[in-house]
């Protein structure tokens, strides 16, 4: 893999990890388009995700600091803000489904799941989920009340992102909207919920690479990760700003057009 290829993949990861258009799906398609055959591509993708996770941590550092203080005060049996405590519990419980699903499906994630036609099909299915979420959202007024039960349910939606083409942020944002959260609050919870999963997945893959005796293009990995971090920060800010005023429809149309293009390339061209 050349440095240019790593930069391209880093840009793609940084943009698509947070926009509801599927980072893993785009990385698979971009790798096929560029003809990149890198050893341990799933590990490479996971480490890029780890880099974008650090972007989330930096962007939401104030929220995370508040949650950490809430946890410490609760352990110390000191008074806590009930809303912050509920958010903390919702994040902890919401992480469980993806951890279980990730362990069960890990053997498939590096094989049958990394297929261009599968990505196209899931892009369409994810778009249908987003359309349904927007339809329900238009018929009700968001209450913006987070509960532990809702956190768990959004965690179930996040599990859908294990299949390339769905989008972690898109699935959890749509889930939050269906459960009565505003788009912006659903996006905020989605980003916070992604941190433990992406840290665990990326961290594990990074440790595996360090311990592995196989050769790996570390320069490309470091450069790609740095690019993902910077671009990821910009993508987070863009999505949170965009989603306060607009719906998911621009992303829905993009996903459908991309799915049609991919199907054409794989089946006809």
Image (cartoon, rainbow, N blue to C red):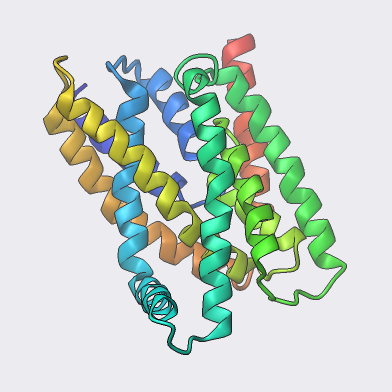
Residue at 27% from the left image edge and 55% from the top image edge: 230
Q: Which residue is nearer to you in this view: 105 or 136? A: 105
**Residue 268 can be seen in this image:** no
For the N terminus, the image quarter is top left
Determine whether, in the image, residue 20 is placed left or right of residue 199.
right
- Residue 43's x, y, as percent? 32, 28
Residue at 35% from the left image edge and 47% from the top image edge: 199
- Residue 167's x, y, as percent? 56, 42
Q: Which residue is nearer to you in this view: 87 or 202? A: 87
Q: Residue furthest right?
A: 139
**Residue 43 can be seen in this image:** yes
- Residue 30's x, y, as percent? 41, 27
Q: Residue furthest top?
A: 268
Snapshot quadrant of residue 236:
bottom left
Determine whether, in the image, residue 167 is placed left or right of residue 3.
right
Residue at 83% from the left image edge and 60% from the top image edge: 136
Q: Residue furthest bottom?
A: 79
Snapshot quadrant of residue 33:
top left
Relative height, residue 69 to residue 268 (above, below): below
Relative height, residue 108 to residue 186 (above, below): above
Determine whether, in the image, residue 243 is placed left or right of residue 221.
right
For the C terminus, the image quarter is top right
């Amino acid at each position: 893999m050349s440095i240019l290829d790593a930069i391209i993949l880093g840009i793609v990861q940084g943009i698509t990890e947070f926009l509801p258009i599927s980072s893993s799906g785009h990385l698979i398609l971009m790798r096929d388009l560029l003809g990149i055959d890198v050893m341990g591509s799933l590990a490479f993708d996971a480490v890029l995700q780890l880099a974008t996770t650090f972007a989330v941590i930096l962007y939401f550092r104030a929220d995370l600091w508040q949650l950490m203080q809430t946890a410490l005060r609760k352990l110390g049996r000191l008074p806590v803000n009930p809303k912050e405590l509920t958010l903390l519990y919702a994040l902890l419980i919401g992480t469980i489904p993806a951890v279980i699903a990730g362990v069960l499906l890990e053997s498939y994630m590096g094989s049958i799941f990394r297929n261009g036609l599968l990505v196209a099909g899931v892009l369409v299915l994810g778009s249908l989920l987003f359309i349904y979420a927007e339809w329900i959202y238009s018929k009700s007024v968001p209450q913006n009340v987070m509960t532990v039960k809702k956190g768990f349910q959004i965690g179930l939606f996040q599990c859908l992102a294990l299949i390339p083409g769905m989008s972690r942020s898109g699935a959890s944002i749509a889930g939050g909207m269906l459960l009565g959260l505003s788009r912006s609050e659903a996006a905020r919870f989605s980003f916070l919920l992604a941190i433990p999963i992406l840290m665990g997945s990326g961290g594990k893959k990074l440790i595996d690479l360090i311990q592995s005796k196989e050769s790996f293009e570390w320069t490309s990995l470091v450069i790609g990760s740095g690019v993902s971090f910077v671009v990821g920060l910009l993508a987070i800010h863009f999505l949170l700003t965009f989603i306060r005023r607009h719906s998911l429809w621009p992303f829905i149309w993009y996903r459908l057009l991309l799915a049609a293009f991919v199907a054409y390339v794989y089946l006809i061209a």
